[in-house]
Amino acid sequence: MVLLHALFEHAAGYALFVVKEVEEIGMLLPQVEDCVLNIGKFNGMVSLAAFFPFKSAQAALDNINAISEGVVHADLKLFLETNLPIGGKKKAMLGVGDAKIGGALQEELGLAIQTGGVVAEILRGVRLHFHSLVKGLTAQAASKAQLGLGHSYSRAKVKFNVNRSDNMIIQSIALLDQLDKDINTFSMRVREWYGYHFPELIKIVTDNSTYCKMAQLIGNRKELSEESLESMEEVVMDSAKAQSILEASRSSMGMDISPIDLINIERFSNRVVSLAAYRLELQEYLHSKMGQVAPNLAALIGDVVGARLISHAGSLTNLAKYPASTVQILGAEKALFRALKTRGNTPKYGLIFHSTFIGRAAAKNKGRISRYLANKCTIASRIDAFSDVPTCVFGDKLRDQVEERLSFYETGEAPRKNLDVMKEAVIQAGEVAAEIKIKLAKKEKKRRKREKKLAALSTGDGEEEVGDANGEAEATENGEEKKKKKKQAVVQMEEEAPAAENGDTPAKKKKKRKSEAMEVEPVAEEAPETPQSEKKKKRKKKD
């Protein structure tokens, strides 16, 4: 007799259900599908054996991450070992929804696992009536737990997404292509619009952005004079062109233009010029981003072509998983399927055609060099995707190999072996990686020192405030002590004054006491002056 248990993973915890009458249920599968919707009938088929609630949201996230990766978490293992009857006459069989976690449980605990069929239908019913099957769990609490776990799981996946840097490259190359189209369209509109007034400028200035700058600079051609030759030379970068523009403006066959129309043309051409400037900034951004994410691919085939390959593949990891034959025709899928359908010749290259290597090769060697280049691109993308410290050493070496292969096709000079080139690249890459790690360690040390200094300064300010308060208190205490000492010295001098009139000895004692007072307290020098003046007054009165 087989005793079937069904394991259900919920956002609130793990639940283990006992399935009654397994053999009958297995035979009547359509009836099971009907009974799933009715809670009364479903309770007769399934009963709750044990429930293990998650202690916190972090514990729930850890368990769900382990299940999604096909790993048996410690909580799940303890739960099954505690509640699943392994020994006895009845053999225990565990039904799970995911075959991946089922295989892991079979290896870990040695259980008989069943997936699909009746187990899938039972788990569907459990998912539908879970809040009714577990006591103390309401539908609202279950939905809140699912929502919270869903948000935290999604945040964790986005946070640890290895392709998050690729997304910036994909968006920037898409925007770059769109800007190229827009700038071209807008420039043609400026040419048509300003061509009514100055048609000869179109043949003299062929570049789109330069034409827009000239239209913005010239304005009304009738106002153009020799004073504006220098400014035109700065834009055109050619004195002969600037002179020819000046001469053409004097004998132009264009129509006159009103100031309002001219203002609108200038505004529109200003927008086109600003778009062209932004495109250059975006290209610099793409260059820096490719140097961080895929330096070897960028060094081998260029920033723009490498970014287009990543964008077409979806991510750098996907590109690294592609074989060289796929990379070779990436971007030429329509031509490939058309050739397969019509039984014609398949394309030799896709996006990699835009690299300089294929353009430099002879017509008979284009297919050979594209195949070789696709092979090197695959190697470079795999190094970029799975290396810890990004360096462009391998990309430079692979580029040198493609150059040698080109020269071999042209001159017959034998290229170096791949093994020797890769050995050199590994040594150089190790040295560069060590230098980068040292620089990163120095930056980390500097950052820690700054944090310590800031912490010390913040604590030092508090200590200074406390020290200032203590200093003020000590100063007040010292002042009070000095005042007391002065009062005592005055009282002693007044007491010794009558004794000084009777004999010399008290005077000597007085002098001794004065000297002692001077040695002990130098601050009390001014105090004896008042008693001496009082003595002189008394003596004068007696005389």
Image (cartoon, helix red, strand yellow):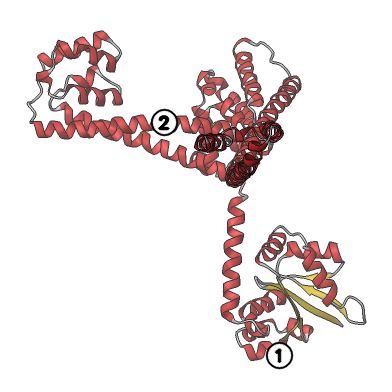
Question: Residue most toward the top?
Answer: 240
Where in the figure is residue 86, as x and y percent of width and height? Answer: 89, 75
Q: Is residue 35 visible?
A: yes
Locate residue 57: give its quadrant.
Answer: bottom right
Q: Amino acid at mark 1?
A: Gly
Q: Mark 2 — residue?
A: 281
Within 10 Å of the Cα at label 1, are there few (<14), some (14-19), or many (20+) other Cα atoms? Answer: few
Q: Residue at x 56, y 42 (%)?
A: 165
Which dot marks residue 44? 1
Where in the figure is residue 55, as x and y percent of width and height? Answer: 71, 70
The answer to whether residue 102 is above or below residue 372 is below
The answer to whether residue 193 is above or below residue 9 is above
Where in the figure is residue 426, as x and y percent of width and height? Answer: 74, 25
Name the image quarter holding the N terminus.
bottom right
Q: Nearer the viewer, residue 508 or 402?
A: 508
State yes or no: discs 2 and 1 in contact (Cβ < 8 Å). no
Q: Residue at x 80, y 70 (%)?
A: 113
Total numbered labels placed on residues in the image: 2
Q: Amino acid at mark 2?
A: Glu
* Of callouts 2 and 1, the N-terminal one: 1
* Left-right relation of 226 to 70: left
Which dot marks residue 244? none
SS at mark 2 in the image: helix
Q: Nearer the viewer, residue 122 or 267?
A: 267
Locate residue 402: give its quadrant.
Answer: top right
* Left-right relation of 525 to 77: left
